[in-house]
Image: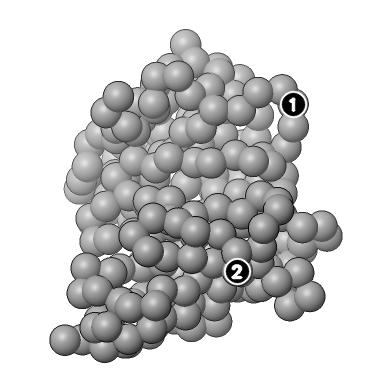
Amino acid sequence: DTGVSQNPRHKITKRGQNVTFRCDPISEHNRLYWYRQTLGQGPEFLTYFQNEAQLEKSRLLSDRFSAERPKGSFSTLEIQRTEQGDSAMYLCASSFMTGSVASGANVLTFGAGSRLTVL
Amino acid sequence: AQSVTQPDIHITVSEGASLELRCNYSYGATPYLFWYVQSPGQGLQLLLKYFSGDTLVQGIKGFEAEFKRSQSSFNLRKPSVHWSDAAEYFCAATGNQFYFGTGTSLTVIP
């Protein structure tokens, strides 16, 4: 297993452009999380999936942000009409959880992140 | 509101000295607690976790942490710091969601 893979590692874009990040989780993991991390801050939760179902998306920063996990494997995070304030590291994590228990004993494995710079 | 607080933004220690990084949590009940480490350009790596049982937990790289319910704390310790320990350290807690503190940056001087 190669761990959680994120692509691209770095993305530089102009304001107003759309960007998409991809996350490939650990294959046997059923949960997938997206976080945003800005300089000097801890990771900020955005959304998560259990299999293909997006169970929490209220923390997505605006309607310009959307995430999908169509087949319950890889996921994409798209930011439309990027703004300079979107510049950050976008982290993906995955885990394996059974049942409907809240996060609880959930242990997240993180990818190396995708750094976005909006000019 | 549920939260995790790391009071120290930056800590500098000499190589070979002991280390303690502070973490306080605010939850309605005892959360599950974690420490992660992040090196430049790397993702977060799990150091250790506390779910229940023995309040002193051992992790990788010689780290340990002690859960103190009365103080709502989960401080990370290491008896002797190595230069390779220089990194950003994050405390995290889960209830319904996974919350991270703002991190403590560790500098190790020779």
Colouring rule applied to residues: one colour
Q: Which residue is mark 2?
A: B66
Residue most extreme to the right = B28
Q: Residues within 10 Å of mark 1 (few under 14, many from 20)?
A: few
Q: CA distance from mark 1 to mark 2?
A: 29 Å
Q: Amino acid at mark 2?
A: Glu
Q: Position of residue A38 (x, y in %)?
A: 39, 62
Q: Is B72 placed above or below A15 here? A: below
Q: Are marks 1 and 2 in contact (CB under 8 Å)?
A: no
Please say whether residue B66 is visible from this viewpoint. Answer: yes
> At 51% from the left edge and 32% from the top edge, which residue is drawn?
A95
Residue on which the image places disc 1: A100
- In the rendering, at what x and y percent does residue B29 appear? 82, 57
Asked if residue A118 lies left or right of residue A54, the reply is left
At 66% from the left and 73% from the top, the residue drawn is B73
Alpha-carbon neighbours of circle 2 within 10 Å: few (<14), some, or many (≥20)?
Answer: some
Q: SS of the residue at dot 1?
A: loop
What is the quadrant of the N terminus of chain B in the image? bottom right
Residue A84 seen in this snapshot: no
Quadrant where the C terminus of chain B is found in the figure: bottom left
Q: Chain of mark 1?
A: A
Q: Secondary structure at mark 2?
A: strand
Q: Reply above or below: A56 against B45.
A: above
User: The disc labelled 1 sits on which kind of residue?
Assistant: Ser
> Percent from the top left, x then y, of residue A25?
39, 27
Say yes or no: labels 1 and 2 on the same chain.
no
**Number of marks drawn:** 2
